[in-house]
Image (cartoon, rainbow, N blue to C red):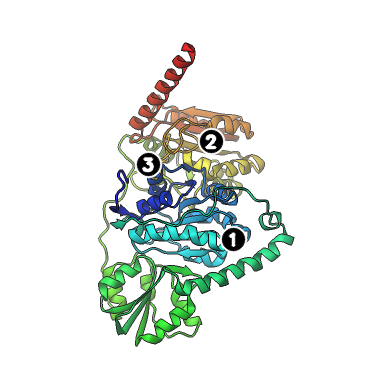
C-alpha cells in the first residue's frame, strides 16, 4: 500500500490509479472486490479517499453514476466479469451521460489467474459506446486515470479505464505530477430528458451518444494518449496496454503507435502510421479486435496466430509473433494446485456433501476448491450466484431420486452479491420436492483478500456499520425451514442437518457459520476495537 507520498514512488498499477484518484479530486470510490482490481479501493482508502464496497458491481456503478449525476467525480472498480453484472447500468449510462467525471476500471484477467473466463472487455467499450483508455504501466495508470476524469467531463460520458493483471500488479516508478481538477463543486442540475431513459428520451440520447463518440474520435487523433514513437521504418507495431511494453523490449528498433485511447480509434493517425512503415503488426492481448477493425478499414496490417489469443502475452510470445515462428509453445508443467486451508470450515462441509452423494450446484469463492481432491464434491460452477438458479433447474427436471440429492452451495459475500434474487426464485417457483440451500458464512470475502461485505457488519475500513443477518432475510423472504450450525462442531450436527433438510421435501436453508481461519484473528481485533469504542462513548455520555 501507499504509505508515504513523494514525487517519485514505486507503485503497482492499482496503487497508481488510487493515487491519481486522490490527486484528481475523486469524491467517492466504490466497487466490488475481485482480483486484479481489489487493491485500488483499498489503497484509495489508505490514502484518505472515501472508499466503500458495494454488495455487487451493478450497485457500485449505480452509486458512482448517482455521484456523477450530482457533479462529483466517482471511481468505480471491478474485475472483468464484474462488468457483466454492471452492464445493465453501463449501456444506459452511455445514453444519460454524466455531469461529473465517472471512470469505470475494468481489470481484465488474461490467462485466468483467478477467474472463470478470460473475456476481453475492450468489447464492452464498443458495445456500450463508452470511451476507453488503456495504460501500459504504472506511470500511465496514474496519468491516464487523471486524463480519464477530464475526458469524462469534457464529453459528459463515462470512461472505461481497462487494465490487465500485469499492469494492475506490476510495480514501476511513478513520477507524480498535478492532475486536472474538477471544474466545479458537486451540484445537482435537473435534466429530465437527459437522465430519465423512457423511449422518447432514449432515442435522441442514442444519437447524442454517437455524436459524442465521433467527437471523441477526432480528439483521439492528437490527444496525449495517442503516442507515436518514430524509429526504424522497416517495422511498425500498433499496440495498447501491456503489449506496448512487450513490443518495446522485443523490438527496440521498431516504430510504435500506442493507442492509449483505444476506443474510439484515431483512424487517421493509424492510417498515417501504417503508411509510414514497410511492415506493420498489431500486437494485442486477447481477442483480435484491433486487427479486425483495421483490416475492415482496408489497412494492410498483420495480426497474431490464433494460438496467441489465449492467455497472457509476454516477451517471448511477442517475439514469436514478430518473427512469424510456427513452433509450438512449450508445455508448462502444472504447479501445485490450490487447496482449502488446513482447518478451513469449508472442509467438513464438502466431506459431508461427498458422503451423502449430493449433486452440488456450486458458486464463486474459495469454497469452489471443493471441486478438487480430496473432496471432488462440486458438480457445477458458472458465475456469481448461479448455484441458486442452476440447483433449482436441476431440481425441476431430474427424476425424484436424483432431484432430492441436489444442494446449492453459496458463500456469504456471494449470497449478498447475487444470491438474493435466486432465493426469490426459490420461493416463487419452488420445485415439487423442495430444495436445500447451504450458505457458507465465514465472515469475510475470503478469496479476494478478506474484504468486508454487508453481512459482516463492517465497512471497507473495518469500522462498524449496518449488518445483514442471513437468517432474518431468509425468513422474511418466505422460508420457514432455517437452520444455523457450526460446521466444525464435533457432534455430527452438519450431517444430521443436511440429511434432515434433504429428506424434508421442503425449501430449506442451512447457514454454516464459522469465521475464516485466516481472517478470524483480524475479526477479533475489529470486534474488540468496536466494543472499546462503544464503551468509551457510553462512558463519555454518562459523564455529561
Q: Report the side of 323 relative to 19 (left or right).
A: left
Where does the image place residue 347, in percent across and percent down from the top left?
Answer: 37, 37
- When asked about the image quadrant of residue 200, the answer is bottom right
Q: Earlier in the sequence, mark 3 or mark 2?
A: 3
Tell me, yes or no, if residue 405 can be seen here: no
Vertical order, 422 against 95 (above or below):
above
Q: Nearer the viewer, mark 1 or mark 2?
A: 1
- Mark 2 — residue? 502
Gap in angstroms between the C-alphas marked 3 and 2: 46 Å
Where does the image place residue 239, in percent across and percent down from the top left?
Answer: 38, 72
Where does the image place residue 117, in percent across and percent down from the top left?
Answer: 44, 59
- Mark 3 — residue? 46
Q: Mark 3: give few (<14), some (14-19) or many (20+) Cα within 10 Å.
A: some
Q: Kindly state the secondary structure of the residue where label 3 is placed.
A: helix
- Mark 1 — residue? 94
Q: Kindly state the secondary structure of the residue where label 1 is placed.
A: helix
- When asked about the image quadrant of residue 113, the answer is bottom left
Vertical order, 243 against 301 (above or below):
above
Q: Nearer the viewer, residue 271 or 147?
A: 147
Q: Earlier in the sequence, mark 1 or mark 2?
A: 1
Q: Nearer the viewer, residue 247 or 48?
A: 48
Amino acid at each position: 500500500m501507499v504509505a508515504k507520498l513523494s514525487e517519485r514512488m514505486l507503485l503497482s498499477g492499482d496503487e497508481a490509479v488510487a493515487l491519481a484518484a486522490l490527486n484528481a479530486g475523486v469524491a467517492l470510490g466504490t466497487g466490488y472486490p475481485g482480483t486484479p482490481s481489489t487493491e485500488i479501493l483499498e489503497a484509495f482508502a489508505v490514502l484518505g479517499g472515501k472508499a466503500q464496497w458495494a454488495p455487487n458491481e451493478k450497485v457500485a456503478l449505480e452509486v458512482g453514476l448517482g455521484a456523477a449525476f450530482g457533479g462529483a467525480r466517482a471511481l468505480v472498480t471491478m474485475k472483468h466479469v464484474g462488468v457483466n453484472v454492471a452492464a445493465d447500468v453501463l449501456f444506459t449510462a452511455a445514453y444519460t451521460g454524466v455531469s461529473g467525471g465517472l471512470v469505470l476500471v475494468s481489470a481484465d484477467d488474461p490467462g485466468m489467474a483467478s477467474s472463470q473466463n478470460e473475456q476481453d472487455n475492450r468489447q464492452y467499450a464498443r458495445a456500450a459506446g463508452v470511451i476507453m483508455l488503456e495504460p501500459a504501466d504504472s506511470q500511465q495508470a496514474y496519468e491516464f486515470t487523471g486524463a480519464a476524469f477530464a475526458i469524462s467531463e469534457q464529453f459528459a460520458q463515462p470512461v472505461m479505464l481497462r487494465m490487465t493483471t500485469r499492469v494492475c500488479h506490476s510495480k514501476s516508478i511513478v513520477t507524480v505530477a498535478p492532475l486536472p481538477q474538477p471544474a466545479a463543486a458537486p451540484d445537482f442540475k435537473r435534466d429530465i430528458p437527459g437522465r430519465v431513459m423512457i423511449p422518447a428520451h432514449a432515442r435522441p440520447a442514442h444519437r447524442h451518444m454517437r455524436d459524442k463518440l465521433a467527437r471523441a474520435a477526432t480528439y483521439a487523433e492528437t490527444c496525449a494518449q495517442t503516442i507515436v514513437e518514430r524509429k526504424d521504418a522497416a517495422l511498425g507495431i500498433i499496440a495498447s496496454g501491456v503489449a506496448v511494453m512487450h513490443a518495446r523490449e522485443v523490438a527496440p528498433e521498431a516504430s510504435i503507435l500506442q493507442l492509449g485511447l483505444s476506443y474510439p480509434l484515431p483512424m487517421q493517425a493509424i492510417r498515417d502510421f501504417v503508411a509510414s512503415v514497410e511492415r506493420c503488426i498489431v500486437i494485442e492481448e486477447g481477442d483480435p479486435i484491433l486487427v479486425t477493425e483495421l483490416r475492415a478499414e482496408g489497412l494492410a496490417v498483420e495480426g497474431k496466430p490464433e494460438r496467441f489469443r489465449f492467455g497472457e502475452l509476454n516477451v517471448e510470445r511477442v517475439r514469436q509473433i514478430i518473427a512469424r515462428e510456427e513452433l509450438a509453445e512449450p508445455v508448462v508443467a502444472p504447479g501445485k494446485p490450490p487447496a482449502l486451508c488446513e482447518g478451513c470450515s469449508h472442509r467438513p462441509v464438502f466431506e459431508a456433501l461427498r458422503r451423502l452423494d449430493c449433486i452440488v450446484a456450486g458458486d464463486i469463492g474459495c469454497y469452489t476448491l471443493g471441486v478438487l481432491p480430496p473432496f471432488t464434491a462440486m458438480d457445477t460452477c458458472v458465475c456469481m450466484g448461479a448455484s441458486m438458479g442452476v440447483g433449482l433447474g436441476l431440481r425441476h427436471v431430474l427424476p425424484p431420486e436424483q432431484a432430492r440429492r441436489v444442494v446449492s452451495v453459496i458463500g456469504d459475500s456471494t449470497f449478498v452479491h447475487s444470491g438474493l434474487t435466486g432465493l426469490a426464485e426459490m420461493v416463487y417457483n419452488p420445485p415439487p420436492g423442495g430444495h436445500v440451500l447451504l450458505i457458507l458464512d465465514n465472515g469475510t470475502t475470503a478469496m479476494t483478500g478478506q474484504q468486508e461485505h454487508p453481512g459482516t457488519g463492517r465497512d471497507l475500513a473495518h469500522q462498524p456499520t449496518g449488518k445483514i443477518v442471513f437468517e432474518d432475510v431468509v425468513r422474511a423472504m418466505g422460508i420457514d425451514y432455517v437452520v444455523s450450525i457450526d460446521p466444525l462442531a464435533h457432534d455430527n450436527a452438519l450431517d444430521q442437518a443436511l440429511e434432515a433438510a434433504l429428506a424434508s421435501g421442503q425449501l430449506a436453508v442451512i447457514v454454516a457459520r464459522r469465521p475464516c481461519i485466516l481472517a478470524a484473528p483480524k475479526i477479533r481485533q475489529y470486534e474488540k476495537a468496536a466494543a472499546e469504542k462503544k464503551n468509551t462513548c457510553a462512558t463519555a455520555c454518562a459523564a455529561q
